[in-house]
Image (cartoon, rainbow, N blue to C red):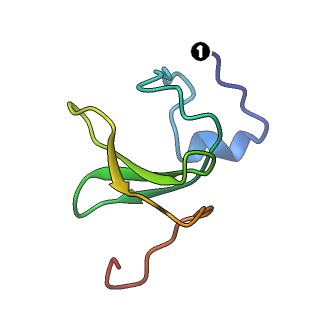
Amino acid sequence: MTLEIRDPRFTDLVDHAIECEKVASGFGFSEGPLWNAQEQCLLFSGILCNRIHRWSAGADVTIFREPSHMANGLAADRQGD
């Protein structure tokens, strides 16, 4: 997988030699990724399948919420909710 860097400031945050890896597929249209640092997991919306999915290293993608009521972008407040 190729990473295209369009702004050199990106390398201030992420090493330019990073390797990208596809960890899952088949969601149709995904949106709204949210990293949960406390639980070390990524939540993202599967809009077309009306679900919010959960991914963490070493585990399969699971369903976090269904139905999601067509949730799009995800966000957390200061308490992590």
From the top left corner, tell me how far across and down residue 50 is, in percent.
54, 54
| Vertical comparison of 45 with 3: above or below | below
From the top left corner, tell me how far across and down residue 60 is, in percent.
27, 32
From the top left corner, tell me how far across and down residue 5 is, in percent.
72, 32
User: What kind of element bears circle 1?
Assistant: loop
**Can you tell which quarter of the image residue 37 is in?**
bottom left
Q: Residue at x 61, y 51 (%)?
A: 47
**Can you tell which quarter of the image residue 66 is in?**
bottom left
Q: Residue at x 28, y 42 (%)?
A: 56
Left or right side of 35 for 8: right
> Nearest the camera: 53 or 1?
53
Q: How many marks?
A: 1
| Residue lying furthest top | 1
| Residue lying furthest right | 6
- The quadrant of the image that shows the N terminus is top right
Residue type at mark 1: give it.
Answer: Met
> Nearest the camera: 70 or 25?
70
Q: Residues within 10 Å of mark 1 (few under 14, many from 20)?
A: few
| Residue lying furthest bottom | 78
| Vertical comparison of 30 with 68: above or below | above
Q: Residue at x 60, y 61 (%)?
A: 70
From the top left corner, tell me how far across and down residue 30 is, in percent.
60, 44
Left or right side of 80 for 33: right
> Nearest the camera: 61 or 7?
61
| Vertical comparison of 55 with 59: above or below | below
- The quadrant of the image that shows the C terminus is bottom left
Q: Residue at x 60, y 39 (%)?
A: 11
- The residue beneath circle 1 is 1
